[in-house]
Image: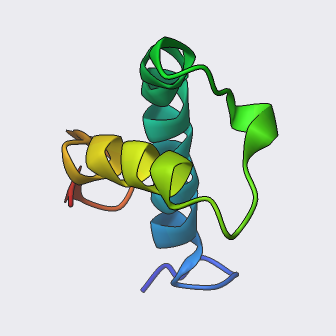
């Protein structure tokens, strides 16, 4: 049996990073419309969080580990 070295969670982490990247990229235009940008993000700004989360919730793609959908 052939076994790869490394962490079995690595492909899931890779897909999660891509999902967040897609959501952040799609958020840029919407944030611009409300006078904000990703650079304005801090952990207390629910408006930016809500925009990012709305795009994260509709992100789907064929990932390394699985078909990725939130």
Residue farthest front in this picture:
35
Q: Is residue 34 above or below residue 38?
A: above
Q: Is residue 7 left or right of residue 54?
A: right
In depth, the one of 67 and 17 nearer the eye is 17
Q: Is residue 5 left or right of residue 10?
A: right
Q: Classify the position of the N terminus by image quarter.
A: bottom left
Q: Is residue 17 left or right of residue 22?
A: right
Whole-percent x, y for residue 55 in the image:
32, 40
In depth, the one of 4 and 60 nearer the eye is 60
Whole-percent x, y for residue 60 in the image:
21, 42
Whole-percent x, y for residue 30 in the image:
42, 20
Query: Which residue is at a point 49% across and 22% down the rendered structure image?
Result: 34
Query: Which residue is at a point 48% across and 50% down the rendered structure image?
Result: 47
Q: Is residue 3 above or below residue 42?
A: below
Whole-percent x, y for residue 65 in the image:
35, 61
Query: Which residue is at a point 64% across and 27% down the rendered structure image?
Result: 36
Query: Which residue is at a point 63% across and 85% down the rendered structure image?
Result: 7
Q: Quadrant of residue 43?
A: bottom right
Residue farthest right in this picture:
39
Q: Quadrant of residue 58?
A: top left
Q: Is residue 2 above or below residue 39?
A: below
Q: Classify the position of the C terminus by image quarter.
A: bottom left
């Amino acid at each position: 049996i052939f076994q790869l070295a490394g962490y079995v969670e690595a492909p899931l982490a890779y897909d999660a990073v891509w999902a967040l990247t897609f959501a952040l990229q799609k958020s840029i235009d919407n944030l611009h419309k409300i006078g904000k940008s990703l650079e304005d993000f801090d952990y207390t700004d629910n408006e930016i969080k809500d925009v990012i989360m709305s795009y994260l919730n509709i992100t789907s793609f064929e990932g390394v580990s699985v078909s990725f959908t939130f």
